[in-house]
Image (cartoon, grey):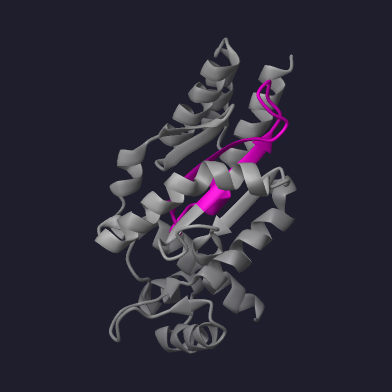
């Protein structure tokens, strides 16, 4: 993949996250200052690489799980340069620091993530999984079909035992679409941060939403939530 193709892929992912509809060549031509024909040729190459797809013959392109993975890996590799917006960071810190008892502190952090990311928020509190923001999740245009709703329900039903058994050990883990251990065809992404709590050395906080995500911001906020919780619970 050339550097220009990488930048076009990034633009398709970021534009698609904003508008929730396939991204056309004419829009990208304006962004990159080249002809639509040039963009279309690059899109064909990205399709051959399996990084984008065309849902309809006359439509623009949308990212594939493989395309999202390359994008997310690039964010992870450059994590030192990724910071959430200061306002969001301060809101999260304030809610966590003022939580009081551990259970309330964790719930506050989840509820704040829901407000900031517009996803479903989750956290493990002892042997239970706390969830908030179901209406956010099922309000997304991706989840209007009955089969995807069932897949999401399966993911949620089995998430807590999977977390307990698999115990992801990275400070931040991102499972995109088919990478999810359950509900692989739901078109959802799971972004979770591990943190230490009085309940377990492997507690988790994160979000579940469509694969169409503002990954840079959401990953940064989830990571920050884990760090804030660990600091607040072990003062």
Q: How many marks?
A: 0
* Front residue of 64 and 16: 64
Residue at 49 percent of width and 55 percent of height? 189
Q: Is residue 77 left or right of residue 68?
A: right
Residue at horizontal 65 percent and vertical 76 percent from the top:
3
Instruction: Reply yes or no: does residue 188 show up in magenta.
Output: no
- Between 211 and 31, the one lying in front of the other is 211
Q: Position of residue 13 (x, y in %)?
A: 48, 64
Q: Is residue 200 magenta?
A: yes
Q: Nearer the viewer, residue 212 or 86?
A: 212
Most extreme residue toward the top is 100
User: Which quadrant of the figure has residue 135?
Assistant: top left
**Which quarter of the figure is the C terminus placed in?**
top right
Q: Position of residue 31 (x, y in %)?
A: 46, 69
Left or right of residue 142: residue 46: right
Could you tell me which residue is drawn at 55 percent across and 24 percent down? 106
- Segment colored magenta: 190-218
* Figure quadrant of residue 115: top left
**Split into 4 quadrants, where in the image is the N terminus?**
bottom right
Residue 82 visible within the image:
no
Residue 218 visible in the snapshot: yes
Instruction: Give percent across and percent down for residue 84.
Output: 58, 39
Residue 49 against residue 102 in the figure, above or below: below
Residue 37 pos. (x, y %): 43, 89
Q: Is residue 70 left or right of residue 48?
A: right
Place residue 20 in its image quadrant: bottom left
């Amino acid at each position: 993949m050339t550097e220009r193709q990488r930048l076009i892929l990034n633009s398709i992912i970021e534009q698609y996250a904003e508008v929730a509809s396939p991204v056309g060549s004419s829009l990208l031509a304006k962004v990159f200052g080249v002809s639509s024909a040039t963009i279309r040729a690059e899109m064909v190459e990205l399709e051959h690489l399996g990084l984008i797809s065309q849902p309809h013959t006359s439509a623009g392109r949308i990212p594939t799980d493989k395309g999202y993975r390359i994008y997310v890996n690039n964010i992870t590799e450059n994590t030192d340069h990724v910071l959430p917006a200061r306002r969001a960071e301060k809101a999260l810190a304030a809610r966590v620091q003022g939580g009081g008892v551990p259970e309330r502190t964790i719930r506050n952090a989840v509820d704040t993530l829901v407000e900031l990311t517009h996803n479903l928020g989750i956290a493990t509190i002892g042997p239970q999984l706390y969830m908030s923001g179901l209406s956010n999740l099922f309000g997304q245009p991706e989840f209007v079909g009955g089969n995807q709703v069932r897949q999401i329900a399966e993911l949620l039903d089995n998430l807590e035992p999977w977390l307990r058994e698999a115990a992801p050990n990275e400070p931040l883990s991102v499972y995109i679409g088919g990478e999810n251990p359950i509900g692989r065809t739901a078109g959802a992404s799971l972004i979770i941060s591990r943190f230490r709590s009085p309940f377990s050395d492997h507690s988790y906080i994160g979000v579940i939403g469509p694969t169409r995500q503002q990954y840079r911001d959401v990953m940064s906020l989830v990571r920050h939530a884990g760090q804030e919780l660990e600091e607040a619970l072990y003062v």
